[in-house]
Amino acid sequence: MQIFLDTAEIDAITARLDAGLVDGVTTNPSLIAKAGAAVFDRIAEICDAVDGPVSAEVVATDTDGMIAEGRRLAEIAPNVVIKLPLTGDGLIACRRFAEEGLQTNVTLCFSANQALLAAKAGASYISPFVGRIEDAGGDGIGLLEDIRAIYDQYGYETEILAASLRGPAHVEAAALAGCDAATIPPKVFDQMVSHALTDKGLAAFLADWKATGRSGLD
Ligand code: G3P
């Protein structure tokens, strides 16, 4: 499963690239606003740092506006993925970009029907919002499973990009549901690495070794 960082903070991205575990980045208008960055400059910086897909979202709500903004975003770098809201206008823009061979990420998906339509519109990625569905009392992981079943049944190649993931348990569930990718905040990425028993076990190993009075591995 691909792991994307869901952030527009460039330092948070570059600090996590060394192990080769970060496959891409997703941003949205809220994240760019929070980072206090200019959209085109920040997306260019991220694309320079990361080889994989970098989602950059339009803010226009009409098809023509989305197409104009999406084309400008796509000109930044070849790895830009144009992020479009899952609306009627967004799906028309998605179809147009698919015909032009441009990558799209259809976002704000809250139902299997929406995901079905995005796949039919030629979306490269669909972003179901797991955490926000749970916030509203729904079954976010169940939605991932439903989308996986529908896409497999009909052979849609749209990749399922689990989004709005709030903790490591969400990432595990997305992987078990067969998602192609998960986008996560940097904090969740760090939490995935950690386990209390790993820390405890390592401390015991080191204490036992120190007790021998030997240094290093010699
Ligand atoms: O990728 C979408 C994500 O940023 C939304 O997450 O936590 O704001 O629901 P959240």
Image (tube, helix red, strand yellow):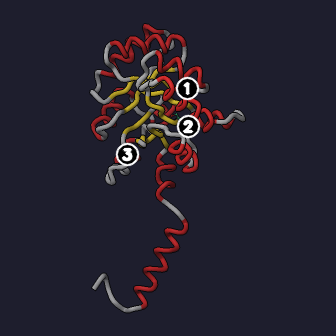
Please give the label number shown on residue 22: 3
Q: Residue furthest front?
A: 153
Q: Position of residue 122 (x, y in %)?
A: 42, 18
Residue 115 versus residue 35: which sits nearer the camera? Answer: 115
**Ligand 1 within 8 A of label 1's CB?**
no
Q: Earlier in the sequence, mark 2 or mark 1?
A: 1
Left or right of 94, for residue 86: right
* Mark 2 residue type: Ser
Q: Position of residue 150 (x, y in %)?
A: 54, 26
Please give the label number shown on residue 70: none
Left or right of 1, for residue 164: right
Q: Residue at x 55, y 66 (%)?
A: 196
* Label 1: which secondary element: strand
**Residue occupied by mark 1:** 108
Q: Position of residue 124 (x, y in %)?
A: 40, 25
Residue 37 versus residue 66: which sits nearer the camera? Answer: 66
Q: Quadrant of the C terminus?
A: bottom left
